[in-house]
Image: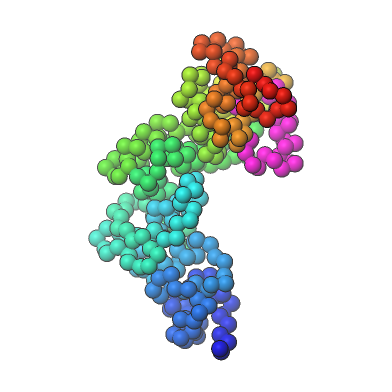
Amino acid sequence: MSRLKPLPLHLQQLPFTVAQARRAGLTPARTRSRDLWTPSREIRLPRSGSFELLESCRAHTSVTSSSFISHITAAKIHGLFLPSRFEAAQCLDVARPRGESSPRRRHVNGRRLLLGPGDLVIVAGVPVTSVQRTLVDIASLLTLDELVDIADQIVCEHHSKCVPPKTAMVERNALNAYIAEHAGARGMRKLLAAMEWVRVGSDSPPETRLRLIIARSPLPDFEPNVEILGPDGLAMVAPDLANEEYKTCAEYDGNHHFTPEQQTKDHDRDFVTNSLGWHQALINRKDMQAGELILVTKLARMLVRGGWPDPKNLAGQSLRGALNTRREFQ
């Protein structure tokens, strides 16, 4: 078996088109060699290479005139919080403007979309539907709560000095206005219902889900982006969720909270919160997996400390066997 001629360096780690291969001096036979995979006509992928989604999209849009990336593939490029069921999706969502034929290629979901002003953006040279257009396009593929997760992510921003600053992908009012302009699209009734639950300030799906559980329970309202002030009136900490009336807050400690540096910051945060007279409930991944009972009971007990009357005796629900302590805890 003859040895294959090595690929030029710039073609070894990225998807490339047949036209690029020819410009690099490769023969047609070399582009059909066993070390290359043909996901779609005129596109080649080195089997030994590792490449990002964006590079595969670049190859597809370069060989498909007037095309752009949309739907789930666009959501991945924008880094939106998609459910895990979409992680293994192999096909790319490639679209053309309405009035042209939809792309027909292997491993491609071809679509035709009517685009409005600002519906396309360029990401590292690849045409992709904008964040707000992508949300509208995928609305019919997601549940209401999954849409809240993503919309929360899109509108999230922070201006407090207690947390790193963050700018929204799309401001909440602008996103609502855009969605209203597409009322006839598929899934819009569900998306409009989801937007009623969207709030500015949630940094992750677990934080959003915690807020939704609280909002749908008999507990009083908790809001994100509430600053806890010190005696001098300056902001000291900004918990994930807070109820100012009863000086009670909730913090979700995800995986990134387990680094030594973050744990030091969290201990200081907890000390300051308690020193200012607030009652804090720490929520973790196991709590979220266990369900509503633990979350509501933990928060109810902290609220009662702050003076909440607890008319349904939620704080009195048993946590026996539900907490990871050496002894049973009622």
Q: Position of residue 238 (x, y in %)?
A: 62, 29
Q: Quadrant of residue 1?
A: bottom right
Tell me: residue 277, above or below residue 202: above
Q: Which residue is rendered at x = 46% and y = 51% of the image?
A: 86
- Residue 247 shows in this picture: no
Q: Which residues are magenta?
A: 248-274
Q: Please give left or right for residue 78 compared with residue 144 in the image.
A: right
Residue at x-position 59% and y-position 19%: 318
Residue 133 lies left or right of residue 285; in this view the side is left
* Residue at 51 percent of width and 34 percent of height: 208
Near-viewer residue (21 or 288): 288
Q: Quadrant of the C terminus?
A: top right
* The residue positioned farthest toward the bottom in the image shown: 2
Give the image location of residue 123, x and y in percent: 47, 58
The quarter holding residue 302 reads: top right
Inspect this view and state whether residue 178 appears. Answer: yes
> What residue is drawn where x is 61% and y is 30%?
283
Residue 269 falls within the magenta-colored stretch:
yes
Query: Please, what is the dominant secondary structure of the magenta stretch?
Result: helix
